[in-house]
């Protein structure tokens, strides 16, 4: 199989007319979701578990097995017994760290190839693939196929590394191009990135990370908090087939863009519903926490649990807006007795108690976890 030769962007043979209805649906759904974001006082805190869930699902497409609950438990000091699970969790945490870094960088400079390399360096730090030119564009030919299979049996061979920078420069220029519809532009950018496959590892996760960053930078989202991986995982075979067909099949770009617009529309609706449910849960729990504690510290305490739904009680020591240890311990006990919090691990010796906000985790997972 010969290396793929990506189309030059912007595309000249995209048939826009059949996409008009889907474009309208996608833009309306995204606008509705952004309206929900505007109604959240601090989306970075209240939607933090969903950001972690996106990292979980995006990494799962690449083969990791760790769950949202396991990630949160690990952060609270409960390491998994299996080393492979710990590496899975570290990959997920790296994904989230990279997203936070990207958001900060976009506040001071436009998206660029150097930022892309920086994010890749964060993504592969200390995990599987860290020895595969971390933070650098590839200088070798890579390919996609079954583990251990030779290039002759590859499912897809990305472009020759000798031409890589030409394709990346064209991709970067198109990122900042003024396209007729930015969501269609995003569909093309995401797919073209996967075709180019500029790194030796981590391309899938980076390609999905670009989606919320682009939407935020284009002003379509007030906050880069948008989650597509759930749809891609649920429709994984179709997702991969559409991507693979882009360099070999006539009319493949229109089919891909239609799939992406449908995916974004559906996921925007799901994200809107989930964000509303989180807001409703927060408002309900705020009343319950105030009722259970009758304390001025009730809301700050709840905010900490929304930011980190599984945590060691000792991690709340000396936090701003919270009382001293004795008062804090009494408040946490009241919240456990009111069944707002659960004890995930009892304190023993120097080992702190671990507390869980089960209603938030169960909502994000869509099932009973705690």
Image (cartoon, grey):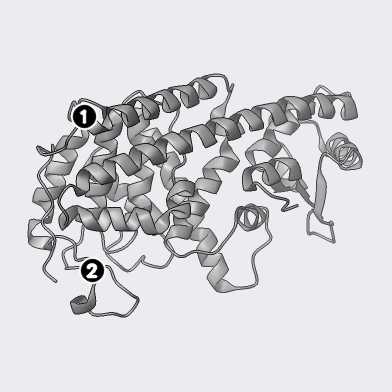
Query: Is 315 on the left-hand or right-hand side of 14?
Result: right
With respect to residue 264, does 201 lie above or below?
below
- Labelled disc at residue 143: 2
In depth, the one of 293 and 144 nearer the eye is: 144
- Residue positioned most to the front: 18
Q: Quadrant of the N terminus?
A: bottom left
Tag 1's secondary structure? helix
Query: Is 160 on the left-hand or right-hand side of 68?
Result: left
* Place of residue 192 in the rendered image (x, y in percent of width and height, measured from the top left): 22, 48
Tag 2's secondary structure? loop
* Place of residue 343 in the rendered image (x, y in percent of width and height, measured from the top left): 82, 51
Within 10 angstroms of label 1, few (less than 14), some, or many (20 or more) residues? few
Q: How many marks?
A: 2
Q: Quadrant of residue 273?
A: top right
- Residue at point 34%, 31% (across, down): 22
- Residue at point 64%, 52% (across, down): 72
* Place of residue 131 in the rendered image (x, y in percent of width and height, measured from the top left): 33, 69
In depth, the one of 88 and 10 nearer the eye is: 10
* Place of residue 122 in the rendered image (x, y in percent of width and height, measured from the top left): 39, 52
- Residue at point 54%, 64% (across, down): 65
With respect to residue 68, does 289 lie above or below?
above
Within 10 angstroms of label 2, few (less than 14), some, or many (20 or more) residues? many
Contact check, label 2 and label 1, Cβ < 8 Å = no
Badge 2 or badge 1: first in the primary sequence: 1
- Residue at point 44%, 43% (across, down): 228
Q: Quadrant of residue 187?
A: top left
Q: Which residue is mark 1?
A: 17
């Amino acid at each position: 199989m010969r290396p793929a030769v990506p189309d030059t962007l912007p595309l000249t043979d995209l048939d826009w007319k059949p996409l008009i209805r889907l474009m309208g649906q996608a833009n309306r759904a995204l606008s509705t979701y952004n309206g929900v974001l505007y109604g959240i006082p601090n989306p970075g805190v209240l939607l933090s578990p969903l950001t972690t869930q996106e990292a979980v699902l995006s990494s799962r497409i690449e083969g990791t097995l760790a769950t949202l609950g396991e990630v949160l438990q690990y952060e609270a000091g409960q390491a998994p017994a299996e080393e492979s699970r710990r590496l899975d969790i570290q990959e997920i945490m790296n994904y989230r760290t990279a997203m936070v870094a990207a958001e900060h960088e976009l506040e001071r400079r436009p998206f660029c190839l150097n930022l892309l390399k920086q994010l890749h360096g964060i993504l592969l730090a200390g995990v599987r693939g860290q020895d595969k030119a971390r933070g650098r564009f590839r200088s070798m030919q890579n390919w996609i196929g079954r583990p251990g299979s030779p290039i002759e049996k590859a499912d897809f061979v990305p472009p020759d590394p000798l031409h890589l920078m030409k394709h990346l420069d064209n991709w970067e220029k198109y990122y900042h191009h003024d396209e007729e519809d930015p969501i269609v532009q995003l569909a093309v950018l995401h797919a073209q990135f996967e075709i180019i496959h500029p790194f030796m590892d981590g391309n899938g996760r980076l390609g999905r990370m670009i989606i919320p960053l682009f939407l935020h930078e284009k002003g379509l989202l007030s906050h880069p908090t948008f989650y597509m991986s759930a749809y891609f995982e649920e429709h994984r075979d179709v997702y991969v087939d559409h991507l693979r067909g882009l360099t070999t099949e006539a009319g493949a770009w229109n089919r891909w863009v239609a799939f992406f617009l449908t995916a974004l529309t559906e996921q925007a609706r799901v994200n809107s519903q989930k964000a509303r449910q989180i807001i409703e849960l927060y408002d309900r729990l705020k009343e319950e926490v105030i009722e259970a504690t009758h304390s001025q510290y009730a809301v700050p305490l709840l905010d900490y649990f929304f930011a980190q739904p599984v945590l060691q009680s000792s991690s709340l020591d000396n936090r701003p807006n919270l009382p001293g240890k004795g008062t804090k311990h009494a408040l946490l006990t009241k919240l456990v007795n009111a069944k707002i919090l659960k004890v995930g691990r009892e304190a023993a010796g120097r080992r702190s108690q671990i507390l869980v906000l089960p209603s938030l985790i169960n909502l994000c997972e869509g099932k009973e976890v705690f």
